[in-house]
Every structure is written in C-alpha cells, then in structure tokens.
Amino acid sequence: MKKEKISLKHISDSLNVSKTLVSMVLNNKGDENGISKETQKRVFAKAKELNYKPNLMARALRMGRSFTIGLVVSDISNPFYARLARFMEDEAALRGYNLLIGSTDENPEKEQNLIKMLVNRQVDGLIISTSQSNSDNFSVLHEQNIPHLFIDRNFDGVDASSVTVDNYNGAFKAVEHLIYQGYKRIAAFAVTPVYVSSIRQRIDGFISAVKTYTKQDASELLVEVDYQDIVRNTRKKIFELLNSVEPIDAIFAVNNKVALACLEALAELGVSIPQEVAIICFDDLDIFKLTTPQISCVSQPIEQISRSAVDLIVSELDAQFASVHRNLLLSPELIIRQSTAKKE
C-alpha cells in the first residue's frame, strides 16, 4: 500500500493552525507576517517530525529558483565539518532546500574553482568556510548578486554575513586552564594555513594567555604543522620538544586534526597523558570521551552554527540579497576531562 505523502494540511491539522500559516512559516515569511517565534518553532519541529518534503520542482518553477545551497568546507571528512553538514542538510530541508557540498583541502585555487562550479550549477546561495587569505576573490559573488555567508572563518570588514565562534577566548580559557592545573611549558600545535581567521584567533588566544600568566616567549612554543603532512610533522616536532633542554609538559592543539596527530605521536613515543604531557584540543570529538584518558577540549556549538547559517542564508535569499548583513559570534564551551588533570 502506497504511503500517503505528508502535506501542509497534515501539519496544520496536527497543530490546529491554518494551512496558510504553515505555508508562510515554511517559506520563511513568518516574521513579516507577524507569526510568533514560538509558533514558527512549532511548525518547523512538526514538519521535521512528520518528515514533510515540499514539491521542489513546482516551487522552483513558480519562484525562479533552484532551491539549492552550496556548502564549501576545507575537508568534509573532518568530523567538525561532517557534523556541520549533517545539521545544515536537515535545516535546509525543513526550508525546502537541498545542499551541495564540496571540499577544498585548504587549497585557495581549488576553492575558487569549486565556487565557480556551484555558481554554474545555479545554486541560490553559498555557505563558505574559506581558505582564502583575503576577501578579494569574493567580489564576483557581489557583482552577480549571489547571496553568501562565511562560517567558522571570516574576514574583517567584508560585506557578507558570518557565523563564527569566539576562538580567541576559547583558546585563552583552554591555556589558562592548563596553567591553573600547574603546567608550565605549553606548546601550541597549529595546522596550516595559519592565516585563516579561526586558526589565527586561537593562536592569539594562546599567546595572550601565556603572556598574561608567565614570562615565557609564546612564539618559541608555537608549532606550525603542514596540513598536507600533519602526522609526520607533528611526530617530529613533539620528539624535538620532549628532548629539548626545557621539555614541554602540555599541548594545546588548535583543532581536532592536529590533536589526533599529537595523540598518535605521544602514543608511539610511549608518553603518558597527563602524567608526562597534558593535552587539550579546540574542538570536541566523540572519541575524546572514549579514550583513556578522556581528552579535555573546547567544544563548538555545531548545531547552533548550522541552524544560524541556514537561517541567515535563507533570509537573504528571501530578501533578494539583503544589503544589511549579520555577523554572529557564538560562545564555545570549555569541557574539562582527564587529559588535563592537576600536575603532581
């Protein structure tokens, strides 16, 4: 027996509201029609619960859109970006959009080509975690009136919306925690390119915390690891730092990729955590709760980033590329686990 397709009427009947109200909310016209935020939230939740799927072809023909959003990230295999994409896909679907996803491998040229390909495929808008050193290459998107916003990384003064995390304070609190726990020689492992805003801000937070609480030159303990060969370079640098005149006793990893490389290197070298070297990571992974010891981290609000990014890009699409943009700065959470236990 053929399963009945969920319609607007199913949603409206289950919530005891009009079909018109449901239509306005799902077409992101709730605010302009005075529909309360609570009601809009209920409509989206019910649509998700009932697995409502709009008729995209009819809608696209009626409104002259593809109802597709392009998502550009550095590496979709990175759990951080994979989770972002998963949440965004669900949020976009609730609003009647599909998501096209591509990885840049931190290569600015590949990123430009990927954006051109997505534009040629007539995506309505773009959500970008950029690997570019500046915003010059995005002027063409403005010229073509293609709505776009930045996630995770952005540029100062750029004319586009963004959803980012307070990387500086998150990093500062992570290093501050290590210092409070008694660790004195803290190395920061940063993955290239270090000019991207998220990495740069985390490095700045590290340097500021070290400068605030110690007399050390933080730049001497900053390690830049090549993105293309993270594991080998990390192992080499950790070996050098452990065998220096003043060996390190803690590591701040600026993201999960370099943290995993650090953990692998420490295991191969037979270094116990945290008895010999403590470690904390900016980013959380499910595996960090399963390792022995469990790994302390700065956790990013991935679901909130995803929801906010989709809300902003769809709002701009509905407003025909709004001239007023929003820059959201979200707060990360310091999660303390066994890998940063108090130094004995």
Image (spheres, rainbow, N blue to C red):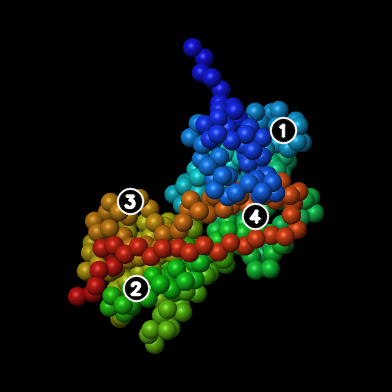
Residue 28: x and y in percent read 65, 44
Residue under the point 65% across and 55% down: 149
What's the residue type where badge 1 is placed?
Answer: Ala
Q: Is residue 53 above or below residue 104?
A: above
- Real-space Cα separation, disc 1 to disc 4, in angstroms: 22 Å
* Residue 231 visible (yes or no): no
The residue indicated by pointer 4 is 149
Residue 150: x and y in percent read 62, 57
Residue under the point 51% across and 18% down: 3
315 and 7: which is toward the camera: 7
Q: Of the residues tagged 3 and 4, which is closer to the observer?
A: 4
What's the residue type where badge 3 is placed?
Answer: Ile
What's the residue type where badge 4 is placed?
Answer: Leu
The residue indicated by pointer 3 is 287
- Real-space Cα separation, disc 2 to disc 4, in angstroms: 33 Å
Q: Secondary structure at mark 4?
A: strand
Horizontal placement of 277 versus 91: left or right? left
Please tell me which of labels 2 and 4 falls first in the chain.
4
Q: Secondary structure at mark 1?
A: helix
- Real-space Cα separation, disc 3 to disc 2, in angstroms: 21 Å
- Real-space Cα separation, disc 3 to disc 4, in angstroms: 31 Å
Q: Of the residues tagged 2 and 1, which is closer to the observer?
A: 1
Q: Of the residues tagged 1 and 4, which is closer to the observer?
A: 1
Please tell me which of labels 3 and 1 falls first in the chain.
1
The residue indicated by pointer 2 is 177
> In the picture, which quadrant includes the C terminus?
bottom left
Horizontal placement of 143 versus 173: left or right? right
